[in-house]
Image (tube, grey):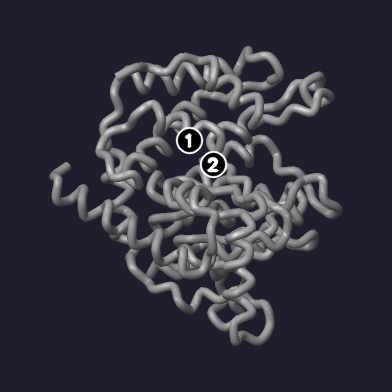
Amino acid sequence: MTPERFNQAVEIVRRLREEISRAVVGQTETVNTVLASLLAGGHVLLEGVPGLGKTLLVRALGKTFAGQFSRIQFTPDLMPADVSGHAFLDLKEHQFTLRRGPIFANLVLADEINRAPAKTQAALLEAMQERQVTIEGEANPLPAPFMVLATQNPIDQEGTYPLPEAQLDRFLVKVLIDYPTADEELALVKQITGSQVGDALDVGAVNTLIKPETVLALQQLVAEIRVDEQVLDYAVRIVRATRDWPGLSIGASPRGAIALVRVARAFALIDGRDFVTPDEIKRAALPVLRHRVALAPEAELEGLTADRTLAGLLEQLPAPRA
């Protein structure tokens, strides 16, 4: 890649972050991780209690993007055909016609995905993995780029269904959204209560910056960012270590190592570098791996979490030196 092309990409990403911050107060690392997933061409699962701005973040990202944006509100009575679409008999034309569902968009917000049962969640599997939807035996390609951003409440809340492991593995990253800091919460309250009726979180101040072609070009540039052999080996060693690490009953598959490198490349671009360092691998490890591992029962009894266990792994596994 040429320096001019790279610098232009860094500037576009910087402006995207600025535009999203017009609507989203704080949550800097969360915004960076979501942008990294977009640049890496992957899907995002956002988890947090209600009221932390999960949907607002996705809407703000959608506003910066000139492509198609759709929102699916997942509910217990939502059917798979409501997501993917279906064929119906057109009585005027005397033939079956395809009615495309909301999945046919560039950015798809699957809001409160774990409010729907597994059969409806599974309607996203083919779309997320193969970028197509099969209806009545015919494969229908999805527009490019294609990205699913799903929000969910913590699975211990009433009326939620845990996502199947196969579904979780389709998400490039899982982002945990925590409560804002005191300063961020004060700024948020000032923003919402200043001469505004109601408590709606508005994305009207966010400007549209990029087209689908721009996203595809950014994704291709990220795929060309240099990764040293030692850094690749570090990513693989981290993933392999999860398979027999104390406290983990299930480790990550090779897809986890691939995802680590993809997200690390995107973080490198966000940081303005055209090469990946071990620090980017470490930074990507928790969002990439936390939903790809399972705690052992004895670790759960001790009150451990996947994040704490993975953090301990990263501390003990030596990183390559420059």
Instruction: Give the residue at x 49% y 67%.
Output: 60
Answer whether labels 2 and 1 touch (C-beta < 8 Å): yes
Amino acid type, residue under disc 1 in the picture = Ala
Q: In which quarter of the image is residue 212?
A: bottom left
Pointer 2 residue: 173
Q: Quadrant of residue 315?
A: top right
Q: Which mark is residue 284?
A: 1
Q: Is residue 301 left or right of residue 242?
A: right
**SS for callout 1:** helix
Q: Relative to the observer, which residue lies in front, 300 or 149? A: 300
Distance from the alpha carbon under mark 2 to that under mark 1: 9 Å
Instruction: Give the residue at x 27% y 40%.
Output: 273
**SS for callout 2:** strand
Point out the tag, 2 or 1, that comes first from the N-terminus.
Answer: 2
Quarter of the picture containing the N terminus is top left
Residue 41, position as x, y percentages in the image: 41, 47
In the rendered image of this protein, does residue 87 appear above or below residue 40? below
Amino acid type, residue under disc 2 in the picture = Val
Q: Quadrant of residue 294?
A: top right
Residue 189, position as x, y percentages in the image: 64, 71
Residue 198, position as x, y percentages in the image: 68, 83
Q: How crowded is mark 1: few (under 14 residues within 10 Å), some or many (20 or more)?
A: many
